[in-house]
Amino acid sequence: ACGSSSKGGSSGGSSGGSSGGSSGSVPGADALDKASGVVNLTFWHSMKDTNQKAVTAIVDAFNTKYQGKIHVTDTYQGSYDDAIAKYKTAVSSHTTPSLMQVYDVGTRFMVDSKQTIPVADLASKDGYALGDLQPNIVNYYSVGGKLQSMPFNSSMPLLYINVEAFKKAGLDPANPPKTLDELADAAKKLTVKDANGTTTQYGFGAADYGWFVEQLTAESGALYCDNDNGRTARATKLNLDSGAPLTYTKWWSDLVKGGYASNTGRPTADAQAAFKAGKVAMNLESTGVLGGYVDAGTKAAAPFTVATAAFPKVTAADSGGPVIGGASLWIDRAGHSDAEVRAAWEFAKFAASAPQQAAWHQATGYFPVSVAALQDPTDVAYRQKHPQFQTAIDELTATKPSTATAGCLLGVMPQARADLEQAMLNVATTGTTAEAALADASTKIAKLISDYNSAVG
Ligand SMILES: O=P(O)(O)OC[C@H](O)CO
């Protein structure tokens, strides 16, 4: 997850460490004019199903606009984790794509990989104003004072509710649970067993997902890693042994062991499928799955009314907000021609533009990275008709920027998140205590961080 954070200006701001990026020169607009023939671009991403269709719609619109000049081929590369693993292989074999979608927590790694060109350099070369991008999103993707990648799909975490199940259990969907305790109470009321004692509906179900722990930590006003969440200097440790990480790990394990939560493991797709099939009545997920849940009213939609509510807090007193999630587009420089880099920049601008972001928001649920897109009449009308699409925007605007809500910038964040998730899974499925599992994970992650920091210097 990432940073709905500080007061960042439109050219970005915070963050420790070097600005990274490739040492290649910054091509100007003439690089495209000089190209002979069509400039072909490869675009790797992790959007599937409903969201993949929406990516393809953007790519098709771009290819039509630039017919005869630029052609983008988009390819689904699996989950965010799968895609980043493939990217690492591509770096070794010098076969990186022209454009790469990388999730929030891959930001520090991408800068350190020195394969890409900061989009701030391309923007200043041709006078492109970054001011239409949501400042807090720009702030997250800025490292060393420069916007490194183009914000594309930005999210907030939400609580999803099966409205009919809520009503059947005598609960009011208009008054959803706001804290972990309230969520646990509702989960108990929403769990249904048949005459044989077999559970036919779990009250709650969600992936075993470190992102939620990161969110609850930010909401409680605490830092997920040291050195101001890795933004004034490289982080050296995660704060996992107490606070929200410990509380959530115990809470999740208690619900699973009590039979009130469906544990589908680490893959987010499995938890999404369980909610969409009506097997669980409440689900924590990104606003980026909302399009898939309601699927614009088609037959692919969940067969019940889906409501969205703000992500819960550990306690009602927590006054912080969530961290922005999702991913951004990186423009590869190392091994790519000037014309290709310029063409990739044209695509990045197009994908972040107000009309494309308004359409993207309505199709997927990811909120627009473009400020103007929120004022687009089609988007305003869509939100009025489908209020579920407003929840993440309210959450974003209610969040006070802070170091906590900036989220943790860490080169090994993907691996660290996986280690935490394994620890949470062990607690929920074995007799290991949360204290012991998190202490073990902390030790393992501290070594990962120390090795990484020594390697990058
Ligand atoms: O599911 P997404 O795309 O909103 O991403 C959620 C997290 O931010 C990934 O780290």
Image (spheres, rainbow, N blue to C red):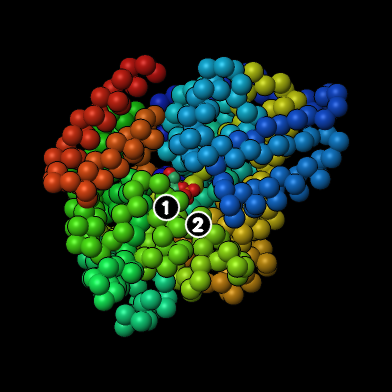
Callout in the foreground (1, 2): 1
User: Gap between marks 1 and 2, in whole Å?
Assistant: 13 Å
Residue denoted by label 2: 289
Q: Report whether 234 appears left or right of 30.
A: left
- The residue shown at (29%, 67%) is 199
The location of residue 333, given as percent across then percent down, is: 62, 23
Whether residue 64 is visible here, answered yes or no, is yes
Quadrant occupied by the N terminus: top left
Give the image quarter of residue 377: bottom right
In front of the other: 314 or 94: 94
Within 8 Å: ligand 1 and the Cβ of disc 2? yes
Residue denoted by label 1: 270
- The residue shown at (56%, 23%) is 90
Q: Which circle's residue, 1 or 2, is located before the other in the chain?
A: 1
- The residue shown at (31%, 20%) is 451
- The residue shown at (58%, 74%) is 384
Quadrant occupied by the C terminus: top left
Give the numbered dot on residue 107. none
In front of the other: 202 or 337: 202
